[in-house]
Amino acid sequence: MSTTVPRSPTRANPGINQVAIFLAGVIVFGTLVIARPNALVVIVFAAVNSAAFAVARGRLRPIALSPPAILSAYITIVTIAGFLLGNSLVGSGGTGGIDSPLPLDLFASTAIWMLAASTLILIGAMLAAGRSTDQSKDIGRALITSLDQVSRLAGPLLVLAVLHIATLIAFLGLGPLLERPNRLIGRSSTLEGALGMLAVGMVLVVGIVFFTKSGPVRAAAAVILSAYALYFFSLGSRRLAVVPVLLLLANILARRGRAQWWKVASIIALSPAILSLPLFLRGSPTHGLRPYFAALPEFVFTGGNYATSLNNILAGFKITALSGFPQGQIPIEWFYISVNPETGVSAGWYEIARRMRINQNTPYSGLGEIISQGFLVFVIMMLALGFVLGLVHRVNRYLLTHPRAKYVAMATLGLTLVLTVQFLQYNLRSNMRYLYLILLLQGAALITVKIYSERGKQDRK
């Protein structure tokens, strides 16, 4: 009696899939070369960048939580989108006075240098990050499943958030927040800048408390979140558009990594509208809560707002092009001031700050300032930045496994996200402040962990 072996379900032929992918690549490649004759070199640099990411996946685990990988991925995405869309978004607004067409040759040159920057950052990071361990594969999952422990510290965290937002208001003054003649506000002190940087991270932490608690604690968290939203709103800050994204992330973390598709889809649809709001408010004759609320009835969201928001996100490509070229427009002495860790007064930053801009509304980009210094400085700086971020990744990998220090690792990732977005749209000095703050936080965390570890050894004796 013969037995029939059940057949496994039919699977697609891997060879057919590979042929389909190859043909799709040929079509995309051919279309680009025909549409953009200068695209060939850009495609080569993009291929090298893709290969670097493929290698980095094994060296920078978990890559989704890797600071150098996050920065490199953002640069690559903005570069490819900015190059492909070219001047098609001109007239959409939201770019701070640089909403004009650029020569196609400048687009190609900028794309090549930006892709090279992304690749060099990854190379530098892999040199510093060391070998990835099997344990590092599960760090992301372990972090997500343990972050709801933040709710155990709900009381102290909410008190800290209240003190934080109160200090920010005290720095800026309640009157100017309500109404002022100019949009930009602040004393530009180091402490004020550091506290402002932490605002995004505090929204995430308070959001986790909101989604893990109930009753009066949740109500208190809601009031604090509203205060942060009003603070961003009064400044006309694009950070207002980040608040829904942070709340979605807080909800996912509070639910132990489980995301609900309708929430994700809602935030994706809502974010462009919220991003276009501060861009609209910046055109008001006066600024602050009162004039901004008065201007709200005039704000109408249309399909053009999506183009405005996209143009604002991709503005980093044009800003980098105008900052980096022609090379040599930024003196090397100014570059040294930009990377100087001293205060702005001591370093001499305020003597050159007004000249480190494309126009009154648009500062040079950090990456553009580096490109402006020429090939040698560019390569050294990108490798050095990648190396430092690789060390940050290596330390974070350790901190994420520690019961308490993982919260410092969370703050590091939050600051990395802000640095990433600003790297293509704000001065290099602004970005270096975030990097120095990251290093300071990690250094303090390592010292604290070491002290507790030594105490634990003594107690066991």
Image (cartoon, rainbow, N blue to C red):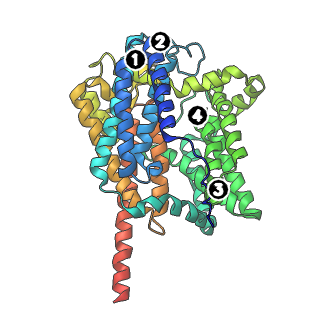
Rendering coords of residue 451 (x, y %) = 35, 73
In this rendering, would 219 be left or right of 420? right
Could you tell me if the residues under marks 1 and 3 are in contact, i.e. CB atoms within 8 Å? Answer: no
Between the residue at mark 3 and the residue at mark 2, the CA separation in whole angstroms equals: 42 Å
Mark 3 vs 2, N-terminal side: 2
Q: Dot 3 corresponds to which residue?
A: 258
Say the numbered circle drawn on residue 238. Answer: 4
Rendering coords of residue 124 (x, y %) = 29, 43
Secondary structure at numbered mark 3: loop
Amino acid on which disc 2 is placed: Ala
Secondary structure at numbered mark 4: loop
In this rendering, would 111 be left or right of 186? left
Say the numbered circle drawn on residue 39. Answer: 1
Label 3, residues with CA under 10 Å away: few <14, some 14-19, many ≥20: few
Could you tell me if the residues under marks 3 and 2 are in contact, i.e. CB atoms within 8 Å? Answer: no
Could you tell me if the residues under marks 2 and 1 are in contact, i.e. CB atoms within 8 Å? Answer: yes
In the figure, 375 relative to 151: above or below? above
Q: Residue at x 63, y 41 (%)?
A: 231
Q: Residue at x 74, y 28 (%)?
A: 296
Q: Dot 2 corresponds to which residue?
A: 35
